Amino acid sequence: MTSTTVVASKAPELRRSVTPWGSFSWGYSDVGADIFVGLGLVLAAAAGASNVAFLFAGLVYVCIGLAYTELAATYPVAGGGQYFVMRGLGDFFGFVAGWAVLLDFTIDVTLFAWTCVDYLSQLIPVFVGSTHPWTHFTVVLLLIVGLAVLNIIGVRESTNFNGFVSGLDVVSELSILMLGFLFAFSPHILVSNMTHHWPTTYQLMLGISYAIISFVGLESISQAAEETQRPASIIPRTSIALILTILIFALAYSHLALGMRPWHPIFDDHGHPMQFWQIFPNNGDNQGKAVALLAAQIPYFGAIAALYVPILGAVLLLISSNSGVFGSSRIAYAMSSNDLLPSIFKRVHPKFRTPVISIVTFCSIAVLELVFAALPSLFPGARQTYAWLFRGESGLDFLADLYAFGAATSYSFVFLALIALRMKDPFSPRKFKIPLNVPMTYRDEKIEFPIVGVVGFIGIFAILIFTLLTHPIGRVAGPLWVVTGIVLYFFYRRHRGLPVFKSQTHDWRTAQVQILKHAGELELMDECIANNKAADERRAAREAVTK
Amino acid sequence: MIAFRYALAALMVVLGFTIIVRMLAMGLHFEELTGLVLGGAMIGLGLHRISLLRRIGEKR
């Protein structure tokens, strides 16, 4: 059987032009937008323990981030989690991980377009979903179709534009947090909320499973690796800054929201004063624009923030939605190149040179998800059915359910791939290695077993279980997506005469040398060749002794 | 530009200290723990950024 690695193909290669700031802003424009979506959902679910939910998910996210950093710096190819899992665990699991990532990307398109409109509704009341459901639906639909068209004709936001928006957002978020903690934060209110509004275990699990969606998008680290100059050196540096920045923002926002003394007092329908976080439960409109609402409650600064934060949030969310369109077509292209998906997904448009079939297919799935999410608000009859079947989950909840499921599934496989690759491929040089390793011997070779990989796997697997336990739609639709994919994969591989559960023969050694050469990491390439040669000599010596 | 980045990193350290001091004033219970983690992470990131900026400055 022939070798089928991506690098062996003579497809056009990506230009390596992304700088350290470009690499950071690429990741930030993807992951940084998540808190704009996640904050309201977590506050609604976990109430007084929202910060604890973010802390739990955040610690798991740090482990995930470190795993992605090591893997992306060692194997700097586009494809991300799907590629690492295929390399570590084989074709079948590579497909399952890639299929879960594809689910996340399609949800990403819809969820971020949806919340983009929610943020705009802060300034344009006719976009409010609960009062103008058809307008909200139509605008989200137009955004998705528009992004699909832009991607088909090959228009992408530039790295410079990403860098500008990311820089503006970092400064803006830091200003919100600084002024918020200085003038609107009361530790007494925080402790009081944590003491008197501590959620039930079920609510806390729900909150944690929503909190993980504030940290989704690490695929972008590995996507950027393919186009970064000297990725093995640059990726670890930018990734760690990215991981810490996102973690701090998520923790800071949840603390501020729980301990906030609002600039303008908030009252419920009966005229009783409310805490700031209490505007989120059972209010899908507020959940979709939490950061804008929080910024507007900071004394004095809130008057300006109320005008620009919704716009900045909407732009960042639209970039993130676009990364879903672009990312899904790229992952599908990579999977198709590795015979995990039919070759139709790597077919490019003769004029625009873009993967048009992939873009149309996955944007169509995103539109279907939008229709399913919007049905309860569009048709009162559907609302009753949803209430009966899914405990009345809102459209935003439905999208977040699937997002959490896809992320938890793909990240679980990435941890297993990290452990497997440390054992099976100790020869590829790792310029960045996750700390806390146990030296041991595996198949007569010295390896370092990653403790963080095990801890991270336990954490993300727990979040996957929380998602299945607490999300009525996610626990049905998520596994259904995976099973549908496996059935399609089964028929495709049978049709092609390829093994279904076993892997094709891959020449990973040659592939690795080519990857490092292509990345310009020539010292690492030499080290890799020397390691392989030394391993061959040791093996030959052992075989000679045995004979 | 580098002065601006220094200022942002320094502000993050100051904010981290502010949060830790304000949370510690409440006592040392479970409820304050997450605030202390947040303050510590802010100080960590701020110092990490300052050390990176110093290295960039030395190279120049």
Image (cartoon, grey):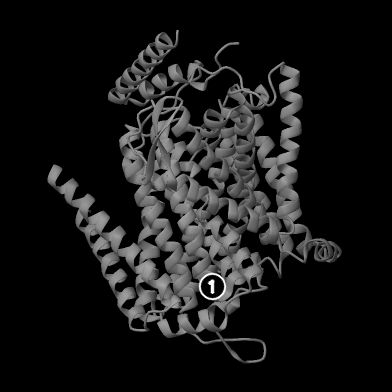
Instruction: Name the residue nearer the viewer: A295 or A88.
Output: A88
Residue that carries the numbered disc 1 in the rendered image: A49
Residue A514 % position (x, y): 41, 19
* Amino acid tagged 1: Ala
- The quadrant of the picture occupied by the C terminus of chain A is top left
* Tag 1 subunit: A
Where A76 falls versus B39 (above or below)? above
Q: Is residue B24 above or below residue A218?
A: below
Quarter where residue A17 is shown: top left
Quadrant in the picture for the N terminus of chain A: top right
The spot of residue A257 in percent (x, y) is 48, 74
The one nearer the camera, A126 or A244, is A244
Q: Is residue A464 visible?
A: yes
- Residue at image location 44% in from the left, 48% down from the top: A452
- Residue A124 found in image quarter: bottom right
For the view shown, which residue lies furthest in the front direction?
A546
For residue A244, side relative to residue A103 (left or right)? left
